[in-house]
Amino acid sequence: MTERTHVCGELLEGLIGEKVKLQGWVKTRRDLGQVIFVDLRDRSGIVQIVFNGENFPEALEVAEKIRSEYVIHVEGTVVAREESTVNVKIPTGTIEVMVDDIKILNASKGLPFTIDDDVEVSEDVRLKYRYLDLRRPKMFNTMQLRYKTSKLIRDILDEKQFMEIETPMLTKSTPEGARDYLVPSRVHHGEFYALPQSPQLFKQLLMVSGFERYYQIARCFRDEDLRADRQPEFTQVDIEASFMSKEELITMMEEMMVRLLKELKGVDVVKTFPRLTYQEAMNRFGSDKPDTRYGMELVDVSEQMLESDFKVFASTVNNGGVVKGICVKGIADDYSRKDLDGLSAVAEIYGAKGLAWLKIEEGQTLKGPIAKFFGEESAAGLIKSFEAEAGDVLFFVADKKRVAWDALGALRIKFAKDLNLVDSKEFNFLWVTEFPLLSYDEDAGRYTAEHHPFTRPLAEDESKLDTAPEEVRAEAYDLVLNGYELGGGSQRIFERELQEKMFKALGFSEEEAISQFGFLLDAFEYGTPPHGGIALGLDRLVMILAERTNLRETIAFPKTASASCLLTNAPSGVSEAQLNDLNLSIQKKKE
Amino acid sequence: MTERTHVCGELLEGLIGEKVKLQGWVKTRRDLGQVIFVDLRDRSGIVQIVFNGENFPEALEVAEKIRSEYVIHVEGTVVAREESTVNVKIPTGTIEVMVDDIKILNASKGLPFTIDDDVEVSEDVRLKYRYLDLRRPKMFNTMQLRYKTSKLIRDILDEKQFMEIETPMLTKSTPEGARDYLVPSRVHHGEFYALPQSPQLFKQLLMVSGFERYYQIARCFRDEDLRADRQPEFTQVDIEASFMSKEELITMMEEMMVRLLKELKGVDVVKTFPRLTYQEAMNRFGSDKPDTRYGMELVDVSEQMLESDFKVFASTVNNGGVVKGICVKGIADDYSRKDLDGLSAVAEIYGAKGLAWLKIEEGQTLKGPIAKFFGEESAAGLIKSFEAEAGDVLFFVADKKRVAWDALGALRIKFAKDLNLVDSKEFNFLWVTEFPLLSYDEDAGRYTAEHHPFTRPLAEDESKLDTAPEEVRAEAYDLVLNGYELGGGSQRIFERELQEKMFKALGFSEEEAISQFGFLLDAFEYGTPPHGGIALGLDRLVMILAERTNLRETIAFPKTASASCLLTNAPSGVSEAQLNDLNLSIQKKKE
């Protein structure tokens, strides 16, 4: 086939008078009888091409047959447009191409939806015809931004002497953590590989090997019940370094984020990100990934409530609980008693027994069902604690600390959204540090790792690992952006003894630890350097950079909430022969 | 922990007099009583550090405890070495570091093998302790070369406006081609994902979407019985472009290869690679991926044999077969009759009934069991055809063309190796074109695609798809380097009708075609541009660049021939609960 000489979007005035060959899609077609105008689109942009029956009747004849999204090859001459027909909306708007020859490369049926950002289409239809959905400029731009993000990350890490090293996808199942995707082995009867939840073990082994600076943009897999912001397979920017302190790593990541924002978005962000300890983040924002683009911080009024007449609050505090609240500015007139009572549902999701509220009125008075319990002095005290003004509403949760944090944290996010408090052009990074190393899992009756079992305890807390595991803080640091956890980093355990202690704290028997992680424990005995690292969620990073709110918008071929691909119909049934090869039978469906 | 100020390999004379902090591994340690010398290693290189008990007795005391591969932190002063102790073998050989403080960061047990390229270790031990094996300079350098290769490929493709786009790993099983690795779905009863054998379908869909220039360095999976040069998971440089002709793609790939060789190896290769048609490659070299670094080309002597007295040869030709041979220079004296007869085994692997040979003696005479069948004239004719000289040996296979090609092609490779004819510093690229589109699979009783079902037939052969499928040539081009197939490229079918015809030629019913590839056929109806692409085996490319002969040497954590990981013991058994989650039972072991 004849090749194109130019791309549509780069046909500028300098080319006037030149013969060009173009290939692309028919975006729109206006048929004026003896003249047909076509907007021809390729990846680079759009140019207007003109079929004039007077000069080129054969070309016009072909042009009469073409429709939207046909793929055509045209040859013609670049000419200046008349001043009155200049289109200032596109870069090529001052010229057009007079076509003398056309060939239809491929036809197109009528589309299930128009290739246009503004057309409303259900997500299911978009996913079924993803190849058409991706033609829409917004999707194309997001994919391009994703590409530029990963390219820039690679370039930055290359400058910092990091080496990308590929680690296995077919690896060993380690039940710790989320559920593995399993891959049956045909050769080894009854045995399975697991797809990696992260390259964690391998990257640590690469540190044992002395690579010192590793990274990988790695596909990872978790067979979990999906939420809006989860996908069964996801991409992680996985980084690990030896002989690099937490401070060095944090500084490097800050530099990376500053460059990403600057080069991809033209946005300047502060060079050193604020840091909050886990305790402070929870106390102030009710979240370990707080969005600090708006206020509404949590206020602890436990002390004040001890002295109030509201027995429910006072007794909660007396029983070791807390009373915390947030102040939402200026909504008193817009929210009826019914609206406010209805918000209890949000708090109840997190186990709160209720959500109390008080409207602030002129003259420092309170209004609402529980107002009667607060005298003049306690009212003034509350108003002061929240720096509240007339028109504001205070919300309270009286419960265990964890419940109050979670419920008010969620309420805070809800109000930010409902009241449109968030500036989507703002990018607030921060670090959350000093996470608890372990958390107690009531269902399992044992401790689980808050990050993962390889995270190092803070040196000063190490001795408590046997005696008070819940008090041990981790040498961990989460990178948070606009209320999303962008990545989790930590310094790692690199001594066999400490790692064994950690497995013990997690309830592993010695045999279990060895059968699952023996190779890592062994490796630690051959001169393992101090090391640490971080993993960033690439999908989420791109989602935020692209100013989207749904991870699926950042992935070329994503899966639905039930982990299906609507385009290919994966997963699907397989043949008896395939199952027999794998020595597998399918169990009857459970009731 | 205190951070290091420098890396070992960069401590040069300019730093004399400066205080430095270093961290790394003890490579060797020489204990001279009051002075201990240690070669300290990190990723950057080696530096000699000195513990002098006179000045720093405490440091010496610690240094007495350290052993090979201990990880230490030292602080000290860079000093010039005395002229007599300068080590010219290392860049830091003119200086050393007088240590005043040392801290042991981690100890090391005795190693299962020494960290040294020259130590012979069984591959099983190396794979079990891969984290130590990777400490060996050769392995480190290969991993670094691998990284540089993929980084450079990415940079080149970026310059050419290609975008990397990630495609799914959990996708649909398509039984065409090699055996899929399957991944059971927990949510969809009895259904499975498949791990991709390549991103072929998705990259074509991205062409439908208008991305025009896609690439991905993608992990691919094939559940095949493994050979030395196969791994269950492998990495592919996957490229696809729309509106790009075969010639443009070939030129781009040539430029890429030239740059890789130049920038990674300092080797200049010809800018335009030779091209052979499939027929020519088979006829001349008995291989569709010929190594052209040496001669021994196949010669067809069928015509001559018709006239010879050797009935076996003549009747083969009369029955539609061929007689082909190769001439191996100067081996007559070194190979006994028994040696030469023994080579039949090589030919028989490929189905040849035998391997005949003739020694060339002075005076244009032949020697050997079949010499008697050749008169003076036919002897001279043969000698002329092979341009043979006294001392050479001719080998013949009389059989079907395919058998003669394969058997002599293999013999040619064997001799090149045995006689050490190959210059490992030479890099001979070439293209093989005009492959058959289809080949007949006797077992399956149907045609299969020589490349894959999406490869375009040559325009001039398209009409034969119904009538003489075996004669249809493909618009395909394989890139060959030093006898290895580095990659396979082709222009693709982009019209529904032609793709349906292709599926029909492959024996698919209409229902089968639609149930497996319906989404692709549908996509082709919405304005699919002409497109083509190529996929390079990254593991193999790195293997050749690294001058290795085993793919496992190029992969950080490879699997054995039985697809096991000796380090982690993957695959392994999983729990009943995991199987129940997936609704799977394991069948009893077959006898």
Image: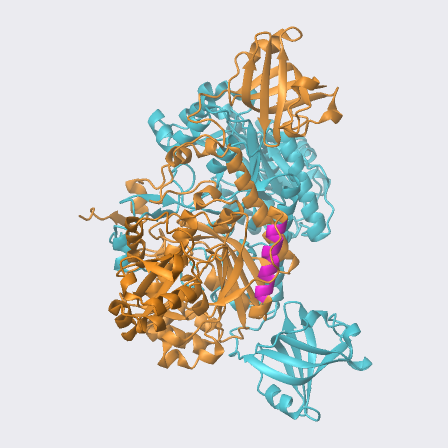
Chain colours: A cyan, B orange
- Please tell me whether residue B265 is drawn above or below residue A507 in the rendered image: below
Residue A84, horizontal then vertical, whole percent: 80, 81
Q: Is residue B313 left or right of residue B363?
A: left
Q: Quadrant of the N terminus of chain A?
A: bottom right
Q: Toward which corner of the image does residue A273 lie, by quadrant?
A: top right
- Nearer-the-camera pick, B426 or B314: B314
Q: Residue at x 70, y 77 (%)?
A: A20
Residue reaching furthest to the right: A83
- Nearer-the-camera pick, B242 or B450: B450
Residue A253, horizontal then vertical, whole percent: 64, 39
Magenta stretch: give its range.
B249-262
Residue reaching furthest to the left: B591
- Please tell me whether residue B574 is drawn above or below residue B204 in the rendered image: above
Residue B180, horizontal then vertical, whole percent: 36, 56
- Nearer-the-camera pick, B583 or B420: B420
Query: Residue B253: within the magenta?
Result: yes
